[in-house]
């Protein structure tokens, strides 16, 4: 079948879906095409981003951290201050409003650690939509507080017992549900990945991060930053920040993947990833010699995904964005350093970006500027960090 060319980022992306889902995706593409150009819709999204989620978020100069490292000025884009504690709400609000415009009565979502499930349950409650969240049994047991949060918000958590009972199995179940239910249901995907139009749509809903950061740094420093740094799980917070600067050829951009413990990791672009197809898109992914998806590892659940959004695969190939990885141990050190120097407890995902900023800031002059995307707050990780460092073993 002919795929619309706009569904690709270079040779990555596309729309690899079963025939039964084609009508659902045609409807979604058409709706997004229409509403992404509708100023009334944009106003409505802005309203909820501001009045409900707490935008705009500050661009904060981390002075004590910068001076401690002794190099570039490090600014933090404070997505951690948003309602529900991370950037995920930007996308969840946008997609839920789109679902309402499409006349859908129900949303479904998949979740690994539960963060996207909580964001989805939140917007479902806000807009009076029914919500079912698919979650693997293993993940649900590790993340019991998030399961309870989703229930408090009125969502139904559907425990998945197939396969490894983790995120990829939850995705499979959500797709199965969607195939039978799309007439009244929207599938609220949580990152800039999956079949077209999700990578584009999620990027657009997250692009508010970069638009704000660009205006804020021009306002405070009267110039563009030298370097942007963001962690890359599926890639939504990173592309949300980067997208506003892609045409500024002098702005360096760095995406940080999870280096795990050095052996087990989720480094798709900087590790041994290969190009393949997973979850409806063509991108880099981690597979074994038999083509089976490899088990990934990261101390941070949000970076623990075997593939990566297709636009990142393209930016990697074009060398426009540099990709690196940070180890679990480096992220944990960065987590503590930010707590102690700035009084900010960062998410473990975001700690990977901070870890890389710490590595490079010292080699840059004091007149240089780095913006780190602080994608989320670390309240959710406090118990996990304690367990890892007390040697009680990881929750995951
Ligand atoms: C989910 C999550 C991520 C990773 O997802 P992206 O789509 O790569 O942004 C990063 N940070 C936080 C706080 C998250 O919750």
Image (cartoon, rainbow, N blue to C red):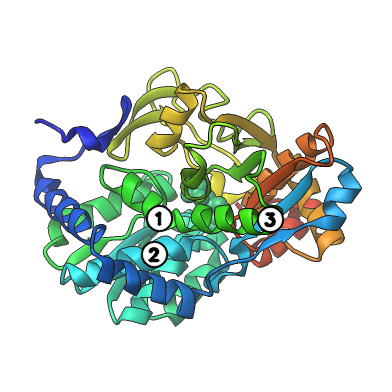
| Lower position in the chain sequence, tag 2 or tag 3 | 3
**Could you say whether the residue bearing mark 1 is in a helix, strand or loop?**
loop
Which residue is at a point 84% across and 36% down the rendered structure image?
362
Residue 111 seen: no
Q: Residues within 10 Å of mark 3 (few under 14, many from 20)?
A: many
Q: Position of residue 76 (x, y in %)?
A: 68, 55
Residue 378 quadrant = bottom right
Residue 231 seen: yes
- Per the image, the residue denoted by label 1 is 190
Residue 309 quadrant = top left
**Could you say whether the residue bearing mark 3 is in a helix, strand or loop?**
strand
Q: Nearer the viewer, residue 33 or 215?
A: 215
**Could you say whether the residue bearing mark 2 is in a helix, strand or loop?**
helix
- Per the image, the residue denoted by label 2 is 92
Mark pair 3, 1: CA separation? 23 Å
- Per the image, the residue denoted by label 3 is 76
């Amino acid at each position: 079948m002919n795929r619309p060319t706009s569904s690709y980022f270079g040779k990555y992306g596309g729309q690899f879906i079963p025939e039964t889902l084609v009508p659902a995706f045609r409807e979604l593409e058409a709706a997004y095409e229409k509403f992404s150009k509708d100023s009334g819709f944009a106003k409505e999204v802005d309203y909820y981003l501001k009045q409900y989620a707490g935008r705009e978020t500050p661009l904060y100069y981390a002075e004590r951290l910068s001076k401690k490292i002794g190099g570039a000025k490090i600014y933090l884009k404070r997505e951690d201050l948003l309602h529900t504690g991370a950037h995920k709400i930007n996308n969840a609000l946008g997609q839920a409003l789109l679902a309402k415009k499409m006349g859908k009565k129900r949303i479904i979502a998949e979740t690994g650690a539960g963060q996207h499930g909580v964001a989805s349950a939140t917007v479902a409650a806000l807009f009076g939509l029914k919500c079912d969240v698919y979650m693997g049994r293993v993940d649900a047991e590790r993340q019991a507080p998030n399961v309870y949060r989703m229930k408090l918000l009125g969502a139904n958590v559907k425990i998945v017992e197939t396969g490894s009972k983790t995120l990829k199995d939850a995705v499979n179940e959500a797709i199965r549900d969607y195939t039978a239910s799309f007439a009244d249901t929207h599938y609220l995907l949580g990152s800039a990945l999956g079949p077209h139009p999700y990578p584009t749509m999620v990027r657009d809903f997250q692009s508010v991060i970069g638009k704000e950061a660009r205006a804020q740094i021009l306002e405070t420093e009267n110039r563009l930053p030298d370097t942007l740094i963001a962690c890359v799980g599926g890639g939504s917070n990173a592309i949300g920040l980067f997208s506003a600067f892609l045409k500024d050829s002098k702005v360096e951009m760095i995406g940080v993947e999870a280096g795990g413990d050095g052996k087990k990791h989720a480094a798709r672009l900087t590790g041994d990833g290969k190009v393949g197809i997973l979850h409806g898109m063509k991108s880099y992914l981690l597979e074994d010699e038999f083509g089976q998806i490899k088990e990934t590892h990261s101390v941070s659940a949000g970076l623990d995904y075997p593939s990566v959004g297709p636009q990142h695969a393209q930016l990697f190939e074009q060398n426009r964005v540099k990709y690196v990885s940070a180890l679990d141990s480096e992220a944990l050190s960065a987590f503590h350093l930010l707590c102690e120097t700035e009084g900010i407890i960062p998410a473990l995902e975001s700690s990977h970006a901070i870890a890389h900023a710490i590595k490079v800031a010292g080699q840059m002059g004091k007149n240089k500027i780095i913006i780190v995307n602080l994608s989320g707050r670390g309240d959710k990780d406090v118990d996990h960090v304690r367990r890892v460092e007390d040697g009680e073993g990881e929750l995951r």
